[in-house]
Image (cartoon, grey):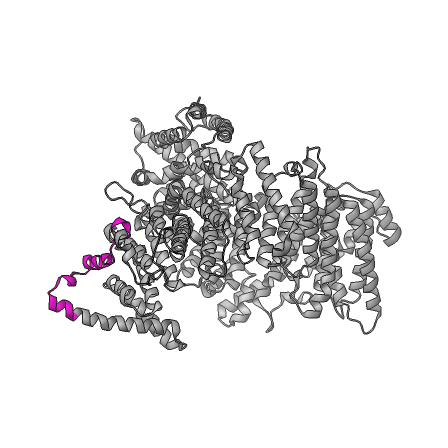
Amino acid sequence: MRVSMEKARPEDSTEGDGELFEKRGSEGFGSQQSLWLVGQRMERWHQKQTSQQQEGAWALSISLAQLENLCKQLYETTDTTTRLQAEKALVEFTNSPDCLNKCQLLLERGSSSYSQLLAATCLTKLVSRTNNPLPLEQRIDIRNYVLNYLATRPKLATFVTQALIQLYARITKLGWFDCQKDEYVFRNVITDVTRFLQDSVEHCIIGVTILSQLTNEINQVSATAFLSEADTTHPLTKHRKIASSFRDSSLFDIFTLSCNLLKQASGKNLNLNDESQHGLLMQLLKLTHNCLNFDFIGTSTDESSDDLCTVQIPTSWRSAFLDSSTLQLFFDLYHSIPPTFSPLVLSCLVQIASVRRSLFNNAERAKFLSHLVDGVKRILENPQSLSDPNNYHEFCRLLARLKSNYQLGELVKVENYPEVIRLIANFTVTSLQHWEFAPNSVHYLLSLWQRLAASVPYVKATEPHMLETYTPEVTKAYITSRLESVHIILRDGLEDPLDDTGLVQQQLDQLSTIGRCEYEKTCALLVQLFDQSAQSYQELLQSATAIPVDVAVQEGWHLSTRAEPVSQVPLPCMATVTLLWVLQLMNLTDSRLAQAGNEKLELAMLSFFEQFRKIYIGDQVQKSSKLYRRLSEVLGLNDETMVLSVFIGKISVRKLVKLSAVQFMLNNHTSEHFSFLGINNQSNLSDMRCRTTFYTALGRLLMVDLGEDEDQYEQFMLPLTAAFETVAQMFSTNTFNEQEAKPRAQNNGPQHCLRAVELWYHDPACTTPVLKLMAELVHNRSQRLQFDVSSPNGILLFRETSKMITTYGNRILTLGEVPKDQVYALKLKGISICFSMLKAALSGSYVNFGVFRLYGDDALDNALQTFIKLLLSIPHSDLLDYPKLSQSYYSLLEVLTQDHMNFIASLEPHVIMYILSSISEGLTALDTMVCTGCCSCLDHIVTYLFKQLSRSTKKRTAPLTQESDRFLHIMQQHPEMIQQMLSTVLNIIIFEDCRNQWSMSRPLLGLILLNEKYFSDLRNSIVNSQPPEKQQAMHLCFENLMEGIERNLLTKNRDRFTQNLSAFRREVNDSMKNSTYGVNSNDMMS
């Protein structure tokens, strides 16, 4: 296949033939000798006399031979020792001063593909390094040389071509803003690639691959790790500048080029037996998918939230999506190419179906949706290609997007909706019946039906949705197929789906909504299935030879499946029947627990009890006389107290605590009665969670009616006091062994816990429960820590907290390098708990922290300094990669910026920049709690800055403290950080679905007042990006935003600004919806 721009070229050209490209070298590819010039610039020994050059060349040729031999040893040998030695030697080579020159010689003279791969990899490392980066001219020479090398050698090994293209992409990204003679020298990517597209199929593949890899490279945040040292404090900011510029200047042209080439390909009879045409089509699809998958507005969407993803296509792309031929192109490709290509086509369709709703007006959206549904209908009518698992998975994703991005009221108005919903229902039922085919795809089908069913009460369209016909079929197919799968799973020894509790719970949540659509039919189905299973189960129990495991698993599925629907609609008759079934089954299984039990069945019953409790038991729950009358007649259970006495669960604790079984546990929690509380040789430290759960429950039960009954409290503490004394004796005499002392130390007082942390800081099995205990002690939950006015207990408690944090922090920092897959368990989890502990202590309101400095007590200072040490040991990426760590860190930072801003101001500049950078990145976090916390932190910092600046301009005020003056100086040296956060906040408010607008508004006013000129420039840029007829309206939006706003941060002024901002957001959104241009957010994101 050749493109229309193709020019004549001799078919007998060879791999090394460079005649065609000699002219192009002067146009931009560069001379083949250009990298020699790079080497000469770096290595002075090239300037020596001719005889010395010849001698050096002879020695160098020996070195090249050795390098090639090392490459073969690295990639071909099976001997581990030889390979490690080769790897070590090659690492030394990459750090040698003549590496650049030898890489060029390896590319020119190397006899193996492995040597070429080594050269490309080393060059990528050289252009990416932060210390001693290559000059601009050298990087231009390398870029030109790589293009020329690829053009004259189109048949290199695939991995070599890929490595060279990666080198080109890296150079281009890192040099995106580099100028030479007022020209951005690395931005002519379309021009460079066009020369490849004008030649043979092999050259076309290389050109398309270059664009695809470049798009992917610029979209990846990880590549910013190679940015210059000046940007390491805020790599995300630098990445967004590059990505935004690339998006606005090149991405749409690349996408248009890719679609045009695909149209040309689809209009010809493709010979896919030709490997080169096969490869070109694959690369074109990858390029298109990379364009559609681009992070357009810097949200860095987590792939795990796939069903929530919206593609934020820029408004300037409207023409491509209003043209129905773009959508039709991919549906035509799906039907005309082999199934091996189809997954990529469907992936592109998934992204197109997820285009943001605001890109269209109502009429345009309806037309687009109609074409989309027609395409889906055509696939369902010809499902042959869906037998491929990858095609099936992507098509399920496409179906899910129909509802996640469009409303049911819009779907029912599509012309072919009745036929399409019937086809989708049949496809879903068939898919559920063949559960073993692609189990990971079921989530998307259930998600579609869940969203459809949940939308039924809100549909205002007169057209029938027909869900009452098809949702019962989906519910029945799911339940019956899961029951029928039990026999096959047990027979063939397949993986038990019940082991994945997260997946089971997710599917049950989805099924509960689907089953609620026609609840009576769901109940009738469950009655029928339970009767059948219960009868079989009872018959098996009465048989002496039968093994009831398979029936028990069926019951587990049955009970778990019915638990969720029962919780949705309070129907006493159905609830009575189901509770009778479960209680009878519980009596049956309890009688056999001594001989055999089924864990999943027990969990299923507990799940049912929990759902039952939510509706029918509790102080605030409406009583149902019909329910308890029937229970009294059949089982003798007259009220909810009697029901609670039958099944013990986490229900209404005020009633539970009165039960004799609970009172026994409160008074006898020893190893004599509960074996898992004991210590023996068979004890497993990983089982300590049982104790945590056990004592959490006992503690809550104890505190229900404790009041001032000190005798009851002391009685409860007797077993723990005995354990304290045992451990104290062990530590005092040093007669303990590790296996025995660790578990005991986890349940004992602060002194013993501190000693345990000193000894076993490297073992999270010991430190995690100890740190959690301390964090719980200092947490003033429900204002439970109330000390007398003359009591020093608050200060003493914080001293112990400080010792714990300092001891653990200083020890854990000596741990050294930790494998990436273990870093959270061994290090970050403990640090996260320390952050939570310090936050709880600082915000507990039971310590006056001013007394520490007043009386020379360093407890507070030690704790805060340890926090800084721990923080600096954590890479920026880890702060947001681990949710518990991010929540604990940003919560602590919020307290510090609110109450201890003088400490923040006194920190070193690099620490302050690290903290500000973490706030900047947290503003765009997916976790709303993290984002809100960052807004609060930023508000406190901005308020502090504004107050200090205001004080510095007043004549009759006390001089600024040393910390304040230093902090102001640092911020004046780095204004770009505050400006970037102003851009980010404004971008989120205007462009994104801002769920915490109030929180975003609080720091925004301070950011504007601190950066009035920058805000003015930003406003003008946004206004000027609008079409002429819209500019006045946009200008008025900004005028209204600041109307009545004074230059202060008083509460009244802030509230006025928040109100203005709400109106501003509505007006701007309305303006953008009606505009064909939209807002150019490049300046905002940059």
Instruction: State the residue at coordinates (24%, 71%).
Output: 63
Question: Is residue 1040 something that shows in the picture?
Answer: yes
Residue 567 visible in the snapshot: no
Q: In this view, does 52 lie above or below 357?
A: below
Main SS of residues in magenta: helix
Residue 681: percent from left, percent from top? 59, 74
Q: Along the line of sight, which residue is nearer the eye, 373 or 821?
A: 373
Farthest residue to the top: give it.
Answer: 1044
Quarter assignment of residue 48: bottom left
Q: How many labels does the image show?
A: 0
Towards the viewer: 223 or 434:
434
Residue at 29% x, 40% y: name it.
973
Q: x and y percent of residue 707 in the render?
A: 66, 46
Of all residues shown, which one is farthest toward the right?
Answer: 633
Q: What stretch is highlighted in magenta?
A: 26-55
Residue 40 in the image: x percent, y percent? Answer: 19, 59
Q: In which quarter of the image is the C terminus?
A: top left
- Is 284 left or right of 332, judged from the image as shown? left
From the viewer's side, name the closer residue of 95 and 758: 95
Query: At which x and y percent is residue 327?
Result: 54, 43
Give whichever of 50, 456 is nearer the camera: 50
Which residue is at 49% across, 58% downward?
Answer: 271
**In the rendered view, would you say 1008 is above or below 706?**
above
> Compared with residue 644, is residue 1044 higher up or lower down, i.e. above or below?
above
Instruction: Give the residue at x 28% y 49%.
Output: 28
Q: Residue 394 vs residue 58: left or right?
A: right
Queried whether the magenta region covers residue 911, the answer comes back as no
Say if the magenta span includes residue 47: yes
Q: In which quarter of the image is the N terminus?
A: bottom left
